[in-house]
Image (spheres, rainbow, N blue to C red):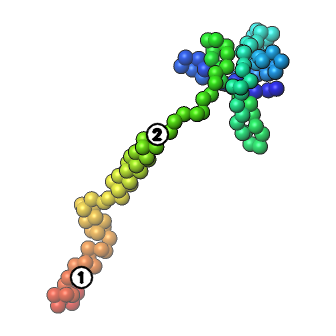
Amino acid sequence: MKMTLIIIDEHNIYMKKADYNEDDRTATVKGRRWFKKGLGQTYNINPKHIKYMWKGKKAQAFCLIDNKTHKSIDLDLKHEVNQKLINRLNYLTQAKFWEARLRRAKIPPQQIIYLLLAGAGLWHFLRLLLLALGFSV
């Protein structure tokens, strides 16, 4: 069976394709094509540690591997959820979003005056004031 190995080395992560042998419970990664062609690396895999992810319409097997021990690592997905922390982070994310949005949408008064002077807005405003005072312009 073909599978993807996610090899975790201290600060690095590598993804390699391997052939999994169910009888020996080992996965073998082929060597490079021209350099050390026959040499490959073998990893011991516990069948309980094999997980499946969907790629398109097919399920692809993958496993996490510790590079030091050449053994599989269990992917523990059962962890407690701190709902208060999640709610607080959601609130802070939304607050930062709206703060940035309002800061971007706010136009300073000096810029409004420049926009009015550039167009006919200020002239129309002055004309309304003069008409209200009884002057026909």
Asked if residue 104 can be seen in this view, the reply is no
Residue of label 2: 82
State the residue at coordinates (17%, 90%): 134
Q: Is residue 42 above or below residue 51?
A: above
Of the two numbered discs 1 and 2 on the same chain, state the one appearing first in sequence: 2
State the residue at coordinates (67%, 19%): 72
State the residue at coordinates (58%, 33%): 78
The quarter of the picture where residue 130 lies is bottom left
**133 sits to left or right of 13:** left
Q: Is residue 92 above or below residue 49?
A: below
Q: Dot 1: few (<14), some (14–19), or many (≥20) neighbours within 10 Å?
A: some
**Please, what is the three-letter code of the amino acid marked with disc 2?**
Asn
The quarter of the picture where residue 57 lies is top right
Q: CA distance from mark 1 to mark 2?
A: 63 Å
Residue furthest out toward the left: 133
Residue of label 1: 127
- Which is closer to the viewer, label 1 or label 2? 2
**53 sits to left or right of 121:** right
Q: Dot 2: few (<14), some (14–19), or many (≥20) neighbours within 10 Å?
A: few
Asked if residue 95 can be seen in this view, the reply is yes
Q: Which residue is nearer to you in this view: 106 or 78?
A: 78
**36 sits to left or right of 111:** right
